[in-house]
């Protein structure tokens, strides 16, 4: 590849996550040099989880030219079913089909491992990816940042972007540096902003009879819920959520033992995800499994000096809306847009330290409001599905559910007002589409998405 005008400016990406690998693709398209450091020995670990790519994430992936190849392992969601924990069907809505008809993108169900592997395999220059590089600290200079790894290796960049998850070392080091050099107490609130009120099993099991590919199934009981996506060949990707005795914060968030997991599985063995498929059934055929607290966080400070964070490292949401990965993609897209603009203005001389810091602060300002909205909406959905309060339970039992058309209407602004890569052409399927065009216009005018109001509340079952 020919030397690019931005080749001297280097981004250190810490974490080969959805956000990290997508950022690598974006920087490659923008001709900005990068180095990606991943602590594990693989970029596609089997962590027992699925992922859903919604239209807001899909549009960006198509801009990068990496979306179409995912057809081989992506299953379009067709409908959402909601059950009681005894297997009784409460409602069924076809909003995924309506959303796909309007926006030309499905809500795509994927195995996370396959998705990450596809992101890696489609990278143009894999020599920029370094495995088994666990970053432990950073050395800060006026003009650069040096990442120091556990094995003694060191990497120098103009900025660091932490896409290393909820337990982000990058975020911890950013906060430490801010405490040492910034205003007193600047990071006090952020250091304890990670909370957990629920725990979750999540796994992938072998195919089972009676599960329909494309179905999104939720089941509810008081303080408990389940989520089951069915991908191609009937492969179940599932979650089981339980409310914990209290809301934990920071270092007090518990970690769980195998014995605790077995005890909880035994207690809820008969919880039905759909009619005839129980937690015990899924556990008996599981291929991969994790048991973790369901952490939530939205930090006030996403950047300090030459460090910025994106994705779960800075805006961690519950999985019930299927937006975690999509919001990571949105964040790194916004960051890349800001870097492209900065470097174009800086020219051959390159940006000053003040310009770099201003650009990273602009990224936070552009993204934080929307990420905050999704953190809050995801939390609301989690609590609604787990019948968190008496009002949640009464609504579930006695109110008519929203129709597929109503749910699709609610979601239009959420998807179409999303950021995109403004230095790459828009996908053909979105050009001239009235929904995408309307959302882009609203976004330009800084309008707020339209969310359900009192006039759209469901009616009581009579």
Image (spheres, rainbow, N blue to C red):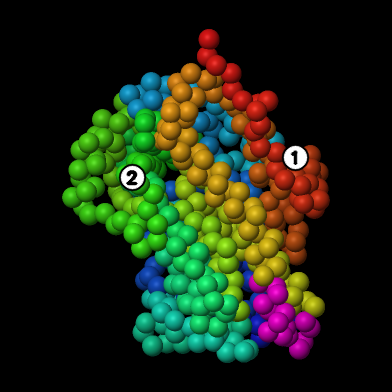
Determine if the magenta segment contains residue 220. Answer: no
332 over 278 or under it: above or below: below
Q: Which residue is mark 1?
A: 435
| Horizontal arrangement in the rendering, residue 54 relative to residue 85 (left or right) | right
**The quadrant where residue 40 appears:** bottom left
| Horizontal arrangement in the rendering, residue 147 relative to residue 45 (left or right) | right
Magenta range: 346-360
Q: Nearer the viewer, residue 135 or 308?
A: 308
Residue 239 coordinates in the image, percent (x, y)? 38, 42
8 over 286 or under it: above or below: below
Camera sees residue 228: no
Determine if the magenta segment contains residue 356. Answer: yes
The N terminus, quarter of image: bottom right
Q: Secondary structure at mark 2?
A: strand
| Disc 1 crowd, CA 10 A, few/some/many (<14, 14-19, 20+) | some
Q: Which residue is mark 2?
A: 244
Q: Earlier in the sequence, mark 2 or mark 1?
A: 2
């Amino acid at each position: 590849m020919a030397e690019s005008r931005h080749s001297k400016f280097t981004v250190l990406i810490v974490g080969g996550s959805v956000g990290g690998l997508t950022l690598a693709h974006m920087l490659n398209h923008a001709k900005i040099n990068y180095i990606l450091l991943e602590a594990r020995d693989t970029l596609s670990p089997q962590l027992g989880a699925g992922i859903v790519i919604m239209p807001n994430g899909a549009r960006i992936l198509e801009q990068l030219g990496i979306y179409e190849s995912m057809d081989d392992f992506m299953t379009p969601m067709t409908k959402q079913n909601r059950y009681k924990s005894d297997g009784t069907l409460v409602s069924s809505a076809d909003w995924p089909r309506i959303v796909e008809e309007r926006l030309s993108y499905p809500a795509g169900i994927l195995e996370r491992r396959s998705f990450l592997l596809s992101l890696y395999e489609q990278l143009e220059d894999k020599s920029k990816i370094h495995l088994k590089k666990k970053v432990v600290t950073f050395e800060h200079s006026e003009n650069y940042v040096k990442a120091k790894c556990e094995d003694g290796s060191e990497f120098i960049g103009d900025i660091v972007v932490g896409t290393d998850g909820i337990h982000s070392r990058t975020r911890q080091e950013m906060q430490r540096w801010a405490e040492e050099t910034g205003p007193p107490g600047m990071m006090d609130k952020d250091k304890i902003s990670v909370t957990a009120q629920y725990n979750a099993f999540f796994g992938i099991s072998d195919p089972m009879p009676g599960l329909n590919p494309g179905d999104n199934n939720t089941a509810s009981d008081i303080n408990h819920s389940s989520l089951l996506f069915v991908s191609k060949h009937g492969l179940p990707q599932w979650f089981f959520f339980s409310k914990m005795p209290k809301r934990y914060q920071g270092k007090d968030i518990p970690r769980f033992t195998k014995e605790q997991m077995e005890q909880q599985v035994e207690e809820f063995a008969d919880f039905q995800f759909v009619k005839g498929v129980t937690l015990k059934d899924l556990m008996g055929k599981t291929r991969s499994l994790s048991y973790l607290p369901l952490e939530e966080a939205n930090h006030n400070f996403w950047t300090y000096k030459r460090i910025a964070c994106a994705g779960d490292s800075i805006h961690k949401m519950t999985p019930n809306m299927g937006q975690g990965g999509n919001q990571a993609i949105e964040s790194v897209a916004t960051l890349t847009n800001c870097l492209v603009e900065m470097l174009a203005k800086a020219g051959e001389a390159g940006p000053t330290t003040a310009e770099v810091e201003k650009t990273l602060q602009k990224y936070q300002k552009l993204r934080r409001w929307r990420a905050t909205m999704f953190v809050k909406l995801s939390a609301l959905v989690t609590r609604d599905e787990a019948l968190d309060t008496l009002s949640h339970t009464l609504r579930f039992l006695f109110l008519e559910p929203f129709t597929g058309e109503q749910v699709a209407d609610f979601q239009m602004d959420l998807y179409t007002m999303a950021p995109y890569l403004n230095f790459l052409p828009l996908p053909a399927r979105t050009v001239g589409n009235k929904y995408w065009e309307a959302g882009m216009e609203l976004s330009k005018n800084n309008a707020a998405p339209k969310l359900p109001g009192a006039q759209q509340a469901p009616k009581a079952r009579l």
